[in-house]
Amino acid sequence: MIYLDYQATTPIAPEARDAMLPWLGGPEAAGFANPHSPHRPGRAAAAAVEFAREQVAGLLPPGGRVIFTGSATEALNLAILGSGAKRLAVSAIEHAAVLDTARWVQPDARILPVDRDGVVDGAADLKGLDLVAVMQVNNEIGTVQPIDTLAAAAHREGALFLCDAVQGAGKIAPPASADMIALSAHKLYGPKGIGALWVRDGIALTPLIHGGGQEQGLRSGTLSPALCAGFGAAAVLARDRAEADAAHIDALWHRARELLSRWTLNGSPDRRWRGNLNIRLDGLDVARLMSDLRDIAFSAGSACASGSGRPSHVLTALGLNPKEAKSSVRLGFGRYSSYREIEDACARIEAAAAAQGV
Ligand code: PLP
């Protein structure tokens, strides 16, 4: 199996898995205590959580606090609903975790369009808003958004700025001008089931989950020290390896582009994270391609949208017609993808497409 779906999730780094093991302890091991218990093993588990919090904070700007959540989806819900904002603007290419939550609050929330390259207009009208949300790196097409410009514009209008940094965290510099930033461990080689919301000091949120008052009163429920430790270790590794990872991914990107040179790239060629190659070929039957290549794991769009039968909202926001959107595939690669795998996969994708006569 060749795995080319790094935007859906990444393999867990061995270092992150190792960091989790002591906190998964069985009856005879120490590390199973509740991190909210005041006894000694509980305090040790709490210390592991706080250590991990510092490690995750290393991926984020100074001057804020990290709240652990069960996922980035939860973090984004906490930011949008917990801020109490009523007048919202979100980009047309946000993940459903932002789009659907914004529309839940305000069914006619303002939708900020993108250009043909998949980039939000930095001069968008942000008047009269309480909250603006634009993602750092898009999950379907990899485009990098002008966060500083948009956050400055939101601030001039007195609005808060939320950034979904799920696909950029640990890969590119954090969106330092945002007021709130959402992350997910499983997109940066950590475990599934844990995310985080970074909140700039001075911003008050209302909790969505009530109970024991954990996570600074904002997210009740017992934390998993194992998940926190895995997230923390993955965050440190991502920072340490950011340059090497990016160089490796750049080399894979160039090779894939050479091998699939007749395919059209979706999204900007320059303003993008290169571990995301979203391409199309007119007339391609993507379902047939996927069934011909069952041992290559890639996506027909975003993991959430594929299977729904609807063309991707991201690709249609770029101006692609439904046929073009439906003839697109997303190849996602990363730290553990090898040059050889990319060459094999691209050659087989090209041959299977040619066999369709397109
Ligand atoms: N935002 C983006 C850009 C994503 O790619 C994803 C996951 O697909 C999410 C948010 C949701 O993350 P999680 O799986 O942690 O809820």
Image: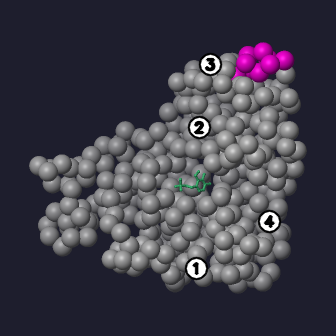
Question: Element type at marker 1?
Answer: loop
Q: Which residue is mark 3?
A: 344
- Give the vertical position of 22 relative to 85 (above or below): above
Q: Which mark is residue 35?
A: none
Rendered location of residue 93, percent (x, y):
74, 56
Q: Which residue is mark 1?
A: 83
Q: Is residue 16 left or right of residue 338?
A: left
The stretch drawn in magenta includes residue 355: yes
Question: Dot 2: within a 10 Å radius of its alpha carbon, few (fewer than 14), some, or many (20 or more) residues?
Answer: many
Look at 44% across and 69% down and name the residue there.
67
Q: Indicate the quadrant of ligand 1 in the picture.
A: bottom right
Identify which amino acid the numbered label 1 is placed on.
Ser
Q: Which residue is mark 2?
A: 5
- Give the vertical position of 99 relative to 297 (above or below): below
State how far apart marks 2 and 4 are (Cα). Answer: 27 Å
Q: Is residue 196 left or right of residue 155?
A: left
Question: Dot 3: within a 10 Å radius of its alpha carbon, few (fewer than 14), some, or many (20 or more) residues?
Answer: some
3 and 4 marks in contact (CB < 8 Å): no
- Give the vertical position of 260 relative to 148 (above or below): above
